[in-house]
Structure formats: C-alpha cells, structure tokens
Image (tube, rainbow, N blue to C red):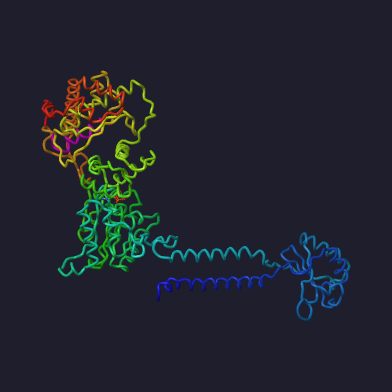
C-alpha cells in the first residue's frame, strides 16, 4: 500500500461512526415523539366558549385533564358535520373523523375546573354529564433537554475513550496507567548529534558503543559477550547528561523512548508500576531500541528509608520494584537498552546499580580547561563574535563552570551586546556575563553611605594586598567596590585547576579570606558584619582541614567525613575529640587572622593607596595592583606560622 493510502485509511471508520450516530439520534427523536406526543394537540379555546358552544349543546364526548394543567376536549362523532366543529373534526390527510383531542384550554386548578363544571351541569342527569378523565403524560418538550443531556454524555464518553485509545503520549483519564514516554524514531528524530557534545570523550565513547551493540549485536554475542541492559550516567548538574542522551537519540538508528523519572509518579496509587510495565511492553515491541529515563533518582531512591510515616513512599517503592522486575525480565540480548541519568547516584537503591541491571556507570565531571574551551567552541558557533574574543581566555576565566553555565555565559554575553546595540559580541561582554554569573547583577543604585563605602574599600583592599603577598593564592584579576547581587564588593581571582590541596594552600586561603576583616580592624579599630560570607568560607575550610583531611597533628590522621551519607553514627567521635576539634579550628583561624593583620601592618602604605584608588575609581585591575605592589613575592610564604598551622 502506498504511504498516502495508508495515511488516509484511518478516516474511513470515522465516517461510518458519524453516520451511525446520526441515525441513532434521529431514531431516538422519532421514538420520543411518538411516546410523548405533544399534549398541546387541539385548538386553544376559552372556558366561556367551551361552556356556551360545546357543553351547553351536549357536544362534548369527554374531557381529559392532562398533568393537572390542561383540559383537552373530545367532540362527539355525531357533530362531525356540524358547521361549528367540521374544521377540527375533518382529518388533514385521508378519510374519516379526526379522533381528537379537538380543543384545549388551560385550567387554573383541578378544583376550580370541577367546581365550574358542576355549576354548568347542575340539574342534568348523571348519564348526560360530561365524563372527566385525568392523565399524567410526559411532554416531549420536557424530555428534550434530558435527551440532549444523555446524548452529550454519550458523545463525550466516546470522545474520551477515543483519546484513551490514541496510544502513547495521549492524555486522558482513561490512559493514566500508560507510559508518558515520548518516542523519537525515524520520522521524529532528535537533532542533537555527538558534534554538539564537546569534550566528554570517554563518555561519548561508551555511549557510542551502546549504539553499536544495538546495530551489530552479533559482533559481541559471537564472542560470548553479554550486551549491557542498563547504563547510568552520573554527574553534577549541567554537565551534559541529558545532552549526551539526546545525542545518542540523534545518532542511533533505532527508536528512542525518553521520559523523566518523575513521570512515573502520580497521585494515583499503582500508576507508576503500570506505567513502567507499559513502557517496557512498548519498548519490547519496538526492539532494538533505547529507553532513556532522566532524573532516575525521582523513582530509584533507596528503599526503606524514612518510610515509617509516609504512605507516599509505598507508591514510589512499588514503582521501583516494578522497574527492577522489568530490568530482570528482559534477556540481555533482547535489544532494549535502558539509559538513565542522575546527579544523585549516592541516593540510588543499590539493587538498581548491581550488575545485571544498570551495570555500566558513566561518570561525568565538571569540564577541565581544554573541555571548557571545546564547549565554548560549540556555543560560540551561533554567535557573531568580534575578532578579539579569545576562547583560551574564556576557558581560563571559568574554572568550576559546567557546560550549562558556559552555554548561559554565551547567551548572556550576546544579550549584553544586543542591549548595547553592538553589531558583534565583544570580549568585554563575555567578561560582564561571567561577572554577572559569578557575583550577580551590578547594583549601582544601592544606597551606601560614604563611611560604609570607605570600610568596603579597605575591606576589599585588605583581601587584595594579603592575597597578592601569599604565593599560593590564585592570581588576582580585579577588585571592585560596586555592589553586585548580595555582596557590597568583590575580588576576582583566576583559579588554577588543582586536584590536590596542601595544608599550606588551605591556610593561605583562610588567611586571605580573613584579610578583609583584618583590614577593618587594622584601619578602623573595629570590625563590621561585612565579613560574614568570608567567615562562612573560613569556618568550612577550617573544619575541613581539621576533621576531614587529617591535617591536624593533635587530631591525627583520621577523617570524620562520611562520603556515602549512610553512616550509622551521627558523630563517630567522643565529646573530648569534639572539643579538641573546636580548639584546633579556633587556633588555626586565629593564627591565620594574626598573620593577615601582620601582612597588612607591613604593607600599610599599599593598603591605604589601594583603598584610596578604589574609592575614586571603584574598580582596579591586575595591572594597577602590580604597579602598586610590585611582582608577587615568593618570600612571604616563609613567614613563620604558629606550630600547628605551619605547612
Ligand atoms: P541536570 O542534571 O541538571 O539535568 P544535565 O547534566 O542533564 O543537567 P544538560 O541538560 O545535558 O545537563 O545540559 C544543559 C545544557 O548545557 C545543554 O543544553 C548544553 O547547552 C550545555 N552543555 C552541557 N554540557 C555540554 C557539553 N559537553 N557540550 C556542549 N554543551 C553542553
């Protein structure tokens, strides 16, 4: 059959159904008409006319009172030729006499009719008196709304059923147990390819292999290898997990089902499990194919935790159980591969991750400098950039940024350039975009008193001077006292990518972080709340040094970090150790603070000049710092620290 013909075919039954519905409707109307013929048959007259022209002449055969409100009059047959009644008694079509009712009039009430009749017929023998019958009859018009109501219910029921039957993705109350997965196949393909995924070479290699498994299973099965059933992609937010899966969908020549873990969970009990069943049923029908479940932690969270009081977890657990059963259910070579993504692998149920289910794990990490360069390459492609935009510089400026952040920077830079009505996106626009993403929007309109401004300037100058003098602190790029986001001032560093940090680096970091407060004390003799963010960082670093990294001689080489989050102990140490940790943290922080003050005291002149320049210019760049403070000295690292904090 040609494609056109195949497309037209489904129309035919619809025409048939429409015809039968109309026929049924017409039959209904006719049936109702005959069952409930209008009680309004007969000419309308008044009581006076009835009394004088009919009753008094003895022409009335009977009076039928309908529904206690309308009296219908039947005229005797012998009056058929009477000139007064001929018109109503002659049938419109055919021969004979019209059976009646011939006239009608409304009665006020049955009692008043009976009273009037009695008065009118007083004295007449009972045999000649008019017989009155009472009838309760449904009126066609009263049934009509009901008829339409029923019809609407029937039609809407049929419509809902039709929607329910429309298959995957259709939404109706009748298909809530069906999977909500979207199917990408030949006709409805993902446009993302591996070209759009920058970096992530190892991960790309792994997922490319999945596509190969499906395309050429024999290559692997011939050697006795089992094709993996499930592959889980784990990584921090924005590292390209979904993007990678989309690229698989775009490159694989097989159907690709995609849905989010949260789509299994509904407010109806049992829906999750039945959606899982339906998803795998459809996947098996279309094998070889790939099923992608994004944010699998929504459904795959470890069972048996915190289930005591919440019934909601039962539903999630039964969904997870069904998922585990389905993963077990299909054979390794059945041609369905399940791809899942999460950024919380630690909370996933171990049963889900064991070999035989999600047996392949792909770990994505935040991109390194060369990967960031490649990601910038992808996202700069659609932008019209000026010649000065240097991808190496941008990649160097963005350590710790995810792929999603980089994509955001590129877009933000284009928006900034457009706002300034530029023809191209320039380097400054990228720098502005990075600043904006790191520190928030500039708030020049924030009202700050001159005294506060002075304190902020010295605070930031303190960070800059101490940071400059400590060789392990990342190179400073610029200092600003323009309020941004929540902060009143900020210093920008160019972080180096490090996998390891020594105690010396940690102590220098703490010292530089405390330098803002130290400057306030050295200059003004009192400190302000402006250092709260710094103190938060300092506290975190100091406790990490003492309690996690085993850097402290008194505490020793122990770490109280529980990276699994599943420790049975809340505090696996005694009160004495806790006290010791606190003491050591305090000693470390105090040592660093003293050192910051010491450096500032020695470079007081530079501190004052820098603060003065900040007050007049608001922003100072690296070049000016270098002019003021000279090259970064290495010797300062040799300044003796207190015994415990010395590297
Ligand atoms: P989440 O865990 O929050 O869902 P995710 O890891 O699934 O995040 P994605 O949705 O894949 O992140 O990535 C978000 C966006 O970041 C992508 O649309 C893409 O623009 C960009 N991106 C991330 N990684 C890369 C990369 N390696 N190459 C190119 N673009 C990337």
Number of numbered callouts drawn: 0
Q: Compared to 552, does 324 lie above or below?
A: below
Image quarter for residue 575?
A: top left
Where is residue 543 shown, x and y percent of the image?
20, 34
Determine the residue located farthest toward the bottom in the rendered image. 95
Image quarter for residue 181?
A: bottom left
The quarter of the picture where the C terminus appears is: top left
Q: Compared to 436, does 17 lie above or below?
A: below
Where is residue 161 shown, x and y percent of the image?
47, 65
Regarding residue 158, the answer to whether it shows in the image is: yes
Extent of the magenta region: 533-551
Magenta span includes 537:
yes
Magenta span includes 613:
no
Q: Is residue 147 left or right of residue 577?
A: right
Where is residue 450 shown, x and y percent of the image?
35, 21
For the stretch drawn in magenta, the main secondary structure is helix
């Amino acid at each position: 059959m040609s494609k056109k013909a195949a497309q037209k075919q489904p129309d035919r039954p619809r025409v048939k159904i429409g015809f039968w519905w109309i026929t049924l409707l017409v039959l209904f109307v006719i049936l109702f008409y005959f069952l409930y013929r209008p009680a309004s048959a007969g000419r309308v007259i008044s009581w006076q006319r009835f009394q004088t022209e009919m009753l008094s002449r003895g022409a009335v055969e009977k009076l039928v009172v309908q529904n206690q409100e309308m009296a219908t009059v039947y005229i005797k047959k012998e009056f058929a030729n009477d000139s007064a009644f001929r018109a109503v008694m002659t049938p419109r079509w055919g021969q004979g006499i019209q059976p009646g009712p011939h006239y009608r009039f409304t009665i006020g009430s049955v009692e008043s009719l009976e009273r009037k009749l009695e008065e009118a017929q007083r004295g007449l023998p009972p045999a000649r008196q008019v017989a009155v019958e009472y009838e309760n009859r449904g009126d066609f018009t009263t049934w009509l709304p009901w008829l339409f109501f029923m019809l609407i219910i029937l039609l809407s029921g049929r419509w809902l059923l039709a929607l329910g039957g429309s298959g995957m993705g259709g939404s109706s109350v009748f298909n809530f147990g069906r999977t909500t997965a979207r199917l990408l196949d030949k006709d409805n393909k993902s446009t993302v390819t591996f070209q759009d995924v920058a970096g992530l070479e190892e991960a790309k290699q792994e997922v490319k292999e999945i596509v190969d498994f499906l395309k050429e299973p024999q290559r692997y099965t011939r050697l006795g290898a089992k094709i993996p059933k499930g592959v889980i992609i784990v990584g921090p937010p924005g590292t390209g997990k979904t993007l990678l899966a989309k690229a698989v969908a775009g490159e694989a020549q097989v159907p690709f089902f995609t849905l989010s873990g949260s789509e299994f969970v509904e407010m109806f009990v049992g829906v999750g499990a039945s959606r899982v069943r339906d998803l795998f049923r459809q996947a098996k029908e279309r094998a070889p194919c790939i099923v992608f479940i994004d944010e699998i932690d929504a459904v795959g969270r470890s069972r048996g935790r915190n289930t005591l009081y919440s019934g909601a977890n039962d539903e999630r657990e039964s969904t997870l159980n069904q998922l585990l059963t389905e993963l077990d259910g299909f054979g390794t070579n059945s041609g369905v591969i399940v791809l899942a993504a999460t950024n919380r692998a630690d909370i996933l149920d171990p049963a889900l991750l064991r070999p035989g289910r999600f047996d392949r794990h792909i770990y994505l990490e935040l991109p390194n400098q060369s990967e960031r360069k490649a990601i910038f390459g992808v996202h700069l492609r659609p932008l019209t950039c000026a010649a000065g935009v240097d991808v190496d510089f941008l990649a160097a400026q963005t350590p710790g940024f995810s792929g999603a952040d980089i994509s955001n920077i590129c877009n933000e830079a284009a928006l900034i350039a457009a706002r300034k009505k530029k023809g191209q996106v320039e380097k400054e626009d990228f720098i502005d975009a990075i600043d904006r993403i790191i520190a928030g929007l500039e708030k020049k309109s924030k009202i700050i008193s001159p005294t506060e401004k002075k304190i902020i300037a010295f605070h930031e100058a303190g960070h800059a001077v101490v940071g400059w003098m400590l060789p392990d602190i990342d190179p400073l790029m610029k200092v600003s006292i323009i309020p941004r986001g929540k902060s009143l001032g900020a210093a920008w560093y160019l972080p180096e990518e490090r996998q390891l940090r020594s105690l010396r680096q940690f102590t220098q970091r703490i010292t530089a972080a405390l330098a803002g407060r130290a400057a306030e004390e050295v200059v003004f003799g009192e400190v302000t709340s402006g250092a709260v963010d710094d103190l938060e960082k300092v506290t975190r670093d100091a406790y990490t040094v003492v309690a996690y990294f085993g850097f402290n001689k008194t505490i020793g080489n122990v770490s109280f970090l529980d990276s699994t989050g599943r420790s049975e102990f809340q505090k696996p140490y005694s009160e004495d150790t806790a006290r010791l940790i606190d003491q050591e943290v305090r000693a470390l922080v105090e040592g660093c603070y003293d050192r910051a003050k010491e450096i500032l005291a020695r470079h007081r002149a530079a501190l004052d000049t820098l603060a003065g320049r900040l007050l007049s210019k608001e922003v100072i760049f690296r070049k000016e710092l270098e002019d003021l403070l000279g090259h970064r000295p290495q010797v300062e690292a040799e300044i003796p620290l207190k015994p415990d904090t010395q590297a």
